[in-house]
Image (cartoon, coloured by chain):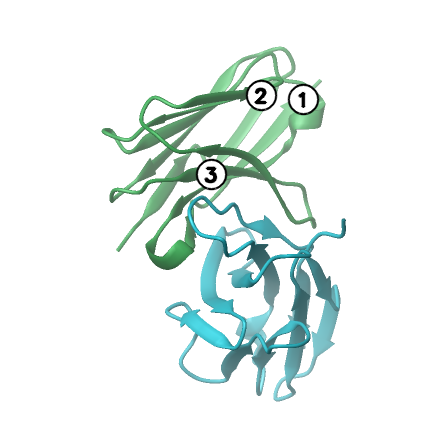
Chain colours: A green, B cyan
């Protein structure tokens, strides 16, 4: 059974700092997604990573994938308050279904 | 270009009642997925449907839950005889169904509260 684990689950940081969220998964998959969720809202797709060594960047967020280690990272550079949200990674299991990590609740303080 | 639409956005039911949640996929999308999110948790897959077909229902509870995606109209997730443990946010996602890479686009969710 495919399992996806994120850490940390809670992260409180100051504006301007850098940090990384980690996502480990237990079995081989050909796709990994990162989503953002604001409180009471739906999920916003941030990145889709397809191959080993893939790196994607959007603004202050950068995601990477190491399929050999079954690890993806979401790096936040010079955090700003607007990035406060819960971030989920998700891996494709059988027949297109997504298996989500527990989520990382990120709070960025002024 | 409307996104995935779900209604109602909020639903309150008493124990034993039925809940019907509706999902209209994005225009041109023929695949629909339902996920459930319990408070403070990640999303859990429930069911994957194409028009008139259930492709994967491995995440559906064995009793009281059913889903359909008819040829015409929205996809429906139906929960019979609701219990308090059914209180959650239910998200629908859709994808084009053209094969290969298919990002799932999520709707706003229906938040079900069972009293």
Count the marks: 3
Q: Which residue is mark 2?
A: A13
**How many residues crowd mark 2 within 10 Å: few (<14), some (14–19), many (20+)?**
some
**How many residues crowd mark 1 within 10 Å: few (<14), some (14–19), many (20+)?**
few
| Left or right: B32 as drawn, with respect to A90 | right
Q: Which residue is mark 1?
A: A109
Q: Nearer the viewer, residue A37 or A29?
A: A29
Q: Is residue B51 above or below residue A55?
A: below
Say which element carries label 3.
strand
| Left or right: B1 as drawn, with respect to A78 | right
Spatial distance from mark 2 to mark 1, Cα to Cα? 6 Å
Spatial distance from mark 3 to mark 1, Cα to Cα? 26 Å
Which quadrant of the rendered structure holds the C terminus of chain B? bottom right
Who comes first in sequence, dot 2 or dot 1? Answer: 2
Q: Nearer the viewer, residue A12 or A102?
A: A102
Choose mark 3 or mark 2, whichever is in front. Answer: 3
Q: Quadrant of residue A39?
A: top right
Residue located 71% across and 52% down the image:
B3
Q: Chain of mark 2?
A: A
Residue located 60% across and 77% down the image:
B71
Q: Is residue A21 above or below residue B71?
A: above
Q: Chain of mark 3?
A: A
Marks 3 and 1 on same chain: yes
Q: Chain of mark 1?
A: A
Marks 3,2: beta carbons within 8 A: no
Marks 2,1: beta carbons within 8 A: yes
Residue located 57% across and 26% down the image:
A12
Choose mark 3 or mark 1, whichever is in front. Answer: 3
Q: Is residue B114 visible?
A: no
Marks 3 and 2 on same chain: yes
Percent of width and height locating residue B28: 64, 57
Q: Which residue is mark 3?
A: A33
């Amino acid at each position: 059974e495919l399992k996806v684990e994120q850490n940390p689950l809670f992260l409180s940081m100051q504006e301007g700092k850098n940090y990384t969220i980690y996502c480990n998964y237990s079995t081989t998959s050909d796709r990994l997604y990162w989503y953002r969720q604001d409180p009471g809202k739906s999920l916003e797709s941030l990145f889709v990573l397809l191959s080993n060594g893939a790196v994607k960047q959007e603004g202050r967020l950068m995601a990477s994938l190491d399929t050999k280690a079954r690890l993806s990272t979401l790096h936040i550079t010079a955090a700003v308050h607007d990035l406060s949200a819960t971030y989920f990674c998700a891996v494709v299991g059988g027949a297109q279904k997504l298996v989500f990590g527990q989520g990382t609740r990120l709070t960025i303080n002024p | 270009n409307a996104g995935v639409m779900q209604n109602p956005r909020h639903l309150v039911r008493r124990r034993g009642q039925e809940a019907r949640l509706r999902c209209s996929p994005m225009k041109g999308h023929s695949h629909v997925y339902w996920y459930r999110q319990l408070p403070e948790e990640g999303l859990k897959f429930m069911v994957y449907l194409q028009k008139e077909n259930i492709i994967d229902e491995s995440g559906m509870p064995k009793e009281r839950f059913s889903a359909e995606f008819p040829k015409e109209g929205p996809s429906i997730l139906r929960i019979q005889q609701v219990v308090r443990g059914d209180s959650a946010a239910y998200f629908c996602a859709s994808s084009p169904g053209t094969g290969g890479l298919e990002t799932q686009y999520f709707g706003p969710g229906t938040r079900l509260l069972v009293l």
